[in-house]
Amino acid sequence: AIEADYHFHGSQHSFTAHVHILQSPIKNELGVVIGQVGVVNGVVTDGWLKDEAVEGVYVRVSGVPHEGPSPYAFEGVLEIRKASKDKD
């Protein structure tokens, strides 16, 4: 499990989310690990939509052409669940 704070800076909105990530291996038919799949859950702790829930998934694979020094490429979705917090 991974616990982290991620900072997102957009042209219209910025926020910080505290997230918990669970990763599981992706194996080919021979049982060789060829990547990882991750599930992300957390909450916006600062900025746009503060206190709303964050959910997402991603896949990490190697051997895919991409920019940057890492041998891994990531593809996924992160969503903020508006109106997810309790209304008092």
Image (cartoon, grey):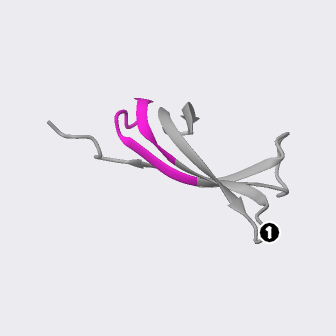
The residue drawn where x is 76% and y is 67% is 28
Specify the quadrant that holds the C terminus. Answer: top left
Name the side, left or right, on which 30 lies relative to 88: right
- Name of the residue lying farthest toward the top: 46
Q: Pointer 1: residues within 10 angstroms few (<14), some, or many (20+)?
A: few
| Residue 74, x across and y down, in percent | 70, 51
Which image quadrant for residue 65?
A: bottom right
**Magenta stretch: dominant secondary structure:** strand
The residue drawn where x is 72% and y is 63% is 27
* Residue bounds of the magenta highlight: 40-57
Secondary structure of the residue carrying tag 1 is loop
- Name of the residue lying farthest toward the left: 88
Q: Is residue 1 visible?
A: yes
Q: Amino acid at mark 1?
A: Leu
Specify the quadrant that holds the N terminus. Answer: top right
The residue drawn where x is 38% and y is 43% is 53
Reply above or below: 69 against 26: above
| Residue 46, x across and y down, in percent | 43, 27
- Name of the residue lying farthest toward the front: 31
Name the side, left or right, on which 27 lies relative to 53: right
Which image quadrant for residue 58?
A: bottom right
Name the side, left or right, on which 8 lies relative to 55: right
The one of 27 and 40 positioned closer to us in this rendering: 27
Q: Is residue 14 visible?
A: no
| Residue 49, x across and y down, in percent | 37, 37
| Residue 82, x across and y down, in percent | 34, 47
The residue drawn where x is 49% and y is 37% is 19
The residue wearing badge 1 is 30
Asked if the stretch drawn in magenta spans residue 42, the answer is yes
Asked if the stretch drawn in magenta spans residue 34, the answer is no
